[in-house]
Amino acid sequence: MLGGYMGKVLWVHLDTGVIEEQSLPETMMRDFVGGYGIAVRLLYDRIPPAADALSPQNVLGFLTGPLTGTPMPTSTRWTVVCKSPLTGGWGDANGSGFFAVALKRAGYDGVFFTGVAPQPVYLYIENGRAELRDASNLWGQDCYQVEDWVKEHLGQDVEAACIGPAGERLVRIAGVVHAKGRVAARSGVGAVMGAKRLKLVAARGNLEVPIADPERIKELRKKYVGQIMDGVGYADSYRKTGTPSYTPIGAVNGDSPVRNWRDSVAAFHGAENLAFEELLKYRVKRHACWRCPIACWGTCRVEYAGRWHETHQPEYETGAAFGALMMNDHYPSIMVANSLCNRYGLDTISAGGCTAFAFECYEAGIIGPQDTDGLVLTWGDHEAMNRLVEKIALREGIGDLLAEGVQRAAERLGPAARPFAIHVGGQELPMHDPRYEPALGVIYRLEATPGRHTQGCQFLVPPGYESARPDFGEEPHKQAGRGHWVKEALCLHHVSNAAGLCLFGYLSMMATALPDFLSAIWGEPFTLQDMMTTGERIANVRQAFNVRAGINPLAWPIPERAYGMPPLPDGPTAGITVQIEQMTREFLEDMDWTLDAAVPRPEALRRLGLDDIARDLWPQAGQTC
């Protein structure tokens, strides 16, 4: 068997309580690597195309990768997969910390859940044994309380991923939380977990992950940790500050959206109040994920509204979502917003988007005090912002509407609200503006999990990978050909995600790091070109999953203001309109997907060894494309 794998996954049938083991074929491990690569290949055949995401027919999975639990730096990621209740298509979310290593060392590469439990349950896994246990006493508790309960009752060495009240209430922007703030946040995966009445997954293990060439791995770790320490790529930035240092930068250079994407950064005057030095006034301790030399995150303690809050330091996305997007430069309130989302189990990107949507609807008179239980939603009012976040998490009042996401909320409120709903395919956009980097407009529109900046790695690829691509945000008015560079970023990063590697490590080591480590761990050669081919294979199955579900991303309305329609009148991105149709065509041609519906062509599928999917999508013999 290939190194790097425990060689099996669990299938937990919640309706019956039956737990089964499934061995993973070596061909699947080679062709799809791990994580959502293996998951989408398995679930393509198991989730009915018409299944409702919150129904028993959906399948929820927790996956690791072959790098997880090995000496490769930053190989700590875990992925949650399902059909998304936000988009109706493929859904996945990525988390970090210690949970992935615990799950892997407990004996499994992943665990899948089918059906719905008759009452709240949790799964406990330890060294090849798994059992469902009653979680009725935990239902209703927030994620911090669950984490404390796990450490007290199951053991300090047990790692868990759980949902909070938002997931229990089927809030469509709910995520899955680990370690009080390492969150698999996007795609509404927490709502699917809640629909299955699954409160948490806990794991403890000390099994060794098999490695084909341990001596070579020691050499590679020394080499690539050395690169991180020497500041290769983005290493210095991630090691010294993590992403929060970009919060004030994005609020000045044009990357951060302002006032629900309506204004340019020229309208936001508080960027200096979001400086990293301000965060340090509240930071208690710096932290690292399992054996990570970067140590990019930390915890903070802040007094706000008469209470003390302990929370993870806000990452850039959170800082921008509750900062410039809301016209808010009060850092303590942003930390509290982060804490609320982590406690209740909300995606901070979508929570910020839903909150900004509500504020603009209030400003326009579409909703009023009678709808908000008296809350006055005025730009920059951070107390109203945080109260609204709680309402969303608990589905209280107007929060019940916003808990559906901005797309569904706008449909309920009527045509006047639709321009304020900034999403693609139902998922709220992250805090990176296509008017700053136009290729993001392609990724947001055509990735199988739309509205995701990390899937295209923010239009970046690892240092040392030769390419003629422009730098991120470089000359955004020059857009011709920019769509051609999305495929390489997308395919390379699919393999990084599937293998269990952190994005920050991926961008802080030379491009040879992943193929070098995977070759030594597998015991078989794996090259950069293999990364491209494997990533393309994963991309095609994810897209095929959506095609079978009836999704045509080219038919999705584009949030016009986010694409510069009309362009901003001032600021660094003044006059920029994203040439989305031109770049979309460039990307589709490179992927060999149809230009009218983004359907992978049969020739592309067969070239990638996906003959069965080619027959599914193109069933008529001799059909032309």
Image (spheres, rainbow, N blue to C red):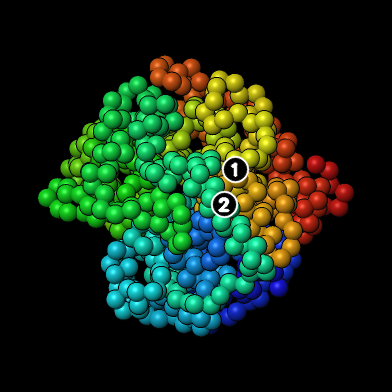
Q: Secondary structure at mark 1?
A: loop
Residue shown at 42%/16% (left/top)? Answer: 569
Mark 2–mark 1 contact, CB under 8 Å? no
Q: Residues within 10 Å of mark 1 (few under 14, many from 20)?
A: many
Asked where in the image residue 9 lies, by quadrant, the reply is bottom right
Which amino acid lies under the numbered mark 1 shown in the image of this protein? Pro
The image shows residue 292 at horizontal and vertical percentages of 46, 57
Front of the two marks 2 and 1: 2
Q: Which mark is residue 120?
A: none
Circle 1 residue: 462
Query: Which of the 4 image quadrants contains residue 36?
Result: bottom right
Label 2 amino acid?
Tyr
Q: With respect to residue 159, does 554 lie above or below? A: above
Q: Residue at 60% of width from left, 45% of height from top? A: 510
Farthest right residue?
622
Residue placed most toward the observer, 550 or 578: 578
Q: Is residue 101 visible?
A: yes
Residue 616 as seen in the image, left or right of residue 95? right
Q: Is residue 28 above or below residue 287?
A: below
Does residue 65 lie above or below 570 as drawn? below
For marks 2 and 1 on the same chain, the one whose residue lies earlier in the sequence: 2
Q: Secondary structure at mark 2?
A: helix
Crowd tier of the residue under label 2, counting other residues whose Cα lies within 10 Å: few below 14, some 14–19, many 20 or above: many
Question: On the rendered image, what quadrant is the N terminus found in?
Answer: bottom right
**Where's residue 547, x and y in %?**
65, 50
Q: How many marks?
A: 2
Which quadrant would the C terminus be assigned to in this image?
top right
Depth order, front residue of 55/511: 511
- Residue 224's disc is 2
Q: Residue at x 60, y 28 (%)?
A: 470
